[in-house]
């Protein structure tokens, strides 16, 4: 029979690391720190770009406005094509939700998180290096 003994310090370290990696709230030095998303009403600044399939971008302004663009080009059956789109409106952040309200009144709810492979995530930043929006990685182009 195999017996596993657990040390309290190992379990504590594992819990803190898990909290950081999986976006849970934890207490540190008496102050409560939430690491699982943006505070309601947080503002972003900057242009975020993804080039996996064409060019897709989000540009956020601190006054709560955004523009969203997309473009692709290539060749099909011997001919060249180019398409593009551009939409604008207002945005609101709350935890891991990005709510877009377009100028025509349509709304869209997307998931959003800061992506940083090598450092603790800081959701108070206005211009993080990379964002995952609806599970697609966008890099800060500013």
Image (spheres, rainbow, N blue to C red):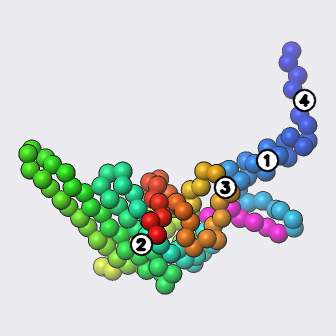
Q: Which residue is mark 3?
A: 119
Residue indicated by mark 1 = 15
How far from the left and from the top, in percent, is residue 75? Answer: 15, 49
**Do tag 1 and tag 3 residues touch (Cβ < 8 Å)?**
no
Give the Cα separation between the discs numbered 4 and 3: 31 Å
The percent position of residue 130, horizontal first and vertical second, equals 52, 60
- Label 4 or label 3, whichever lies nearer to me, is 3
Q: Is residue 23 left or right of residue 57?
A: right
Quadrant (top left, top right, bottom left, bottom right) of the N terminus:
top right
Question: Does residue 100 show up magenta in the picture?
Answer: no
First along the sequence among labels 2 and 3: 2
Which segment did they paint magenta? 31-37
Marks 2 & 4, CB-CB < 8 Å contact: no
**Mark 1 and mark 3: span between their CA atoms?**
18 Å
Rendering coords of residue 77 (x, y %): 9, 44
Q: Is residue 113 visible?
A: no
Residue at mark 2 to residue at mark 3: CA–CA distance:
24 Å
Query: Would you call the spot at circle 3 few (<14 residues within 10 Å), some (14-19), or many (20 or more)?
Result: few
Q: Which residue is mark 2?
A: 59
Q: Nearer the viewer, mark 2 or mark 4?
A: 2
Most distant residue in the bottom direction: 63
Q: Residue at x 9, y 50 (%)?
A: 79
- Which one is earlier in the sequence, the residue at label 2 or at label 4? 4
Query: Counting other residues with Cα less than 10 Å from the Cα at mark 2, is it few (<14), some (14-19), or many (20 or more)?
Result: some
């Amino acid at each position: 029979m195999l017996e596993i003994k657990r040390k309290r310090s190992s379990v504590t370290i594992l819990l803190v690391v898990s909290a950081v990696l999986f976006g849970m709230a934890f207490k540190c030095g008496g102050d409560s720190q939430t690491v699982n998303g943006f505070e309601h009403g947080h503002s972003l600044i900057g242009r975020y770009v993804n080039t996996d399939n064409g060019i897709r971008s989000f540009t956020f302004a601190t006054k709560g406005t955004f523009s969203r663009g997309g473009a692709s080009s290539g060749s099909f059956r011997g001919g060249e094509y180019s398409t593009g789109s551009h939409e604008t409106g207002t945005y609101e952040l709350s935890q891991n939700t990005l709510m877009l309200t377009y100028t025509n009144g349509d709304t869209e709810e997307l998931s959003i998180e800061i992506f940083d492979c090598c450092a603790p995530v800081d959701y108070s930043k206005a211009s993080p290096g990379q964002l995952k929006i609806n599970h697609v990685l966008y890099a800060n182009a500013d």
